[in-house]
Image (tube, rainbow, N blue to C red):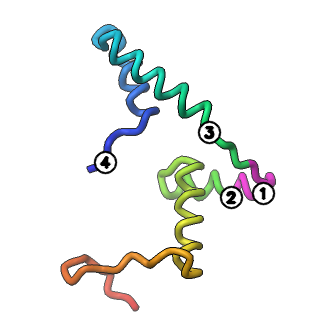
């Protein structure tokens, strides 16, 4: 199980704002500010942006998650990163 991301934590806090302690809210807001400050936007041509939005919607991912996924896949396929190996007990779909 993965930890919730900053955006999810902020959304949950907004839904129950009366129940969030002031120190917890301060921590979340500082994390959000830090992420915004360090965010490097990647701009694409309009046709690429549209394809990214469509793909992200199909995969149920954000645009940035989709970019990370595509880059990782490309790096693995071009041997810049090691390919994830399947363990003996991993499920496979039965195709080669």
Residue at the extreme right: 45
Of mark 4 and mark 2, the one earlier in the sequence is 4
Of mark 2 and mark 3, the one earlier in the sequence is 3
x 44%, y 78%: residue: 83
Q: Are marks 4 and 3 in contact (CB under 8 Å)?
A: no
Q: Answer whether residue 27 is magenta in the image.
A: no
Q: Which residues are magenta?
A: 43-51
The percent position of residue 80, horizontal first and vertical second, equals: 56, 76
Give the labeled residue for mark 1. 47
Q: Nearer the viewer, mark 4 or mark 3?
A: 3
Q: Which mark is residue 39?
A: 3
Q: Are marks 1 and 4 in contact (CB under 8 Å)?
A: no
Q: Nearer the viewer, mark 1 or mark 4?
A: 4
Q: Which mark is residue 2?
A: 4
- Mark-to-mark CA distance, 3 and 1: 23 Å
* Image quadrant where residue 91 sits: bottom left
Structural crowding at the residue carrying mark 4, measured as other residues with C-alpha within 10 Å and reported as few (<14), some (14–19) or many (≥20):
few
The percent position of residue 25, horizontal first and vertical second, equals: 38, 16
Determine the secondary structure under disc 2.
Answer: helix
Give the labeled residue for mark 2. 51
């Amino acid at each position: 199980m993965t930890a919730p991301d900053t955006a999810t934590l902020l959304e949950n806090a907004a839904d129950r704002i009366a129940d969030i302690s002031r120190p917890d809210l301060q921590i979340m807001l500082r994390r959000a500010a830090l992420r915004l400050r360090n965010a490097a936007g990647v701009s694409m041509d309009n046709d690429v942006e549209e394809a990214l939005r469509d793909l992200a919607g199909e995969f149920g991912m954000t645009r940035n998650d989709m970019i990370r996924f595509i880059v990782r896949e490309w790096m693995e396929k071009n041997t810049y990163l090691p390919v994830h190996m399947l363990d003996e007990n991993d499920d496979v779909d039965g195709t080669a």
